[in-house]
């Protein structure tokens, strides 16, 4: 969850940035964090499909949160 909040924070800073070089730096940081989030999502998918994990509710909630954050930052990127 902390990763999700970090990404939303970076996204917010991009929206507020007035300097183009600052925006580019933050966009690079955002891309890096989104890639991390995607790796987490893939790991959660693996755990979710595993028979070793019995209670999958927390995994499902985490996956939904990751997908929500990813969709928000993907479709609402500032121009």
Image: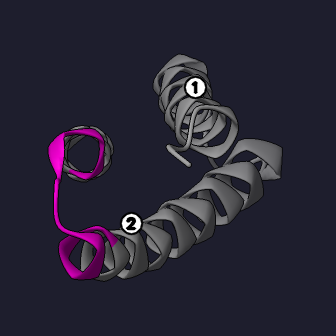
* Closer mark to the observer between disc 2 and disc 1: 2
Q: Label 1 neighbourhood size at 10 Å, few (<14), some (14-19), many (20+)?
A: few
Q: Is 56 drawn above or below residue 8 in the view shown?
A: above
Element type where label 1 sits in the image: helix
Earlier in the chain: of badge 2 and badge 1, it is: 2
Viewer-nearest residue: 62 or 15: 15
Image x and y of residue 75, in percent? 69, 35
Residue drawn at 49 percent across, 60 percent down: 37
- The residue where tag 2 is placed is 30
Residue on which disc 1 sits: 68
Contact between marks 2 and 1 (CB within 8 A): the answer is no
> Magenta residues, as a range?
14-23
What residue lies at 23% left-to-right and 53% top-to-bottom?
Answer: 10
Query: With respect to residue 76, does 70 lie above or below?
Result: below
Magenta span includes 10: no
Decide whether residue 20 is among the magenta residues.
yes
Q: Nearer the viewer, residue 53 or 8?
A: 8
Q: Is residue 25 above or below residue 34?
A: below
Q: Is residue 48 left or right of residue 12?
A: right
Inter-mark Cα distance, 2 to 1: 15 Å
Dominant SS in magenta: helix
Q: Give how far across and how far down residue 43 sits, in percent.
A: 62, 64
In the figure, is residue 54 to the left or right of 48? Answer: left
Q: Which mark is residue 20?
A: none
Q: In x, y percent, where is residue 63?
A: 59, 35
């Amino acid at each position: 969850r902390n990763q999700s909040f970090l990404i939303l924070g970076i996204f917010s800073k991009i929206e507020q940035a007035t300097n183009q070089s600052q925006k580019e730096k933050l966009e690079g940081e955002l891309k890096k964090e989104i890639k991390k989030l995607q790796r987490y999502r893939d790991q959660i998918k693996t755990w979710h499909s595993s028979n070793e994990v019995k209670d999958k509710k927390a995994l499902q909630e985490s996956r939904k949160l990751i997908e929500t954050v990813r969709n928000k930052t993907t479709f609402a990127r500032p121009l």
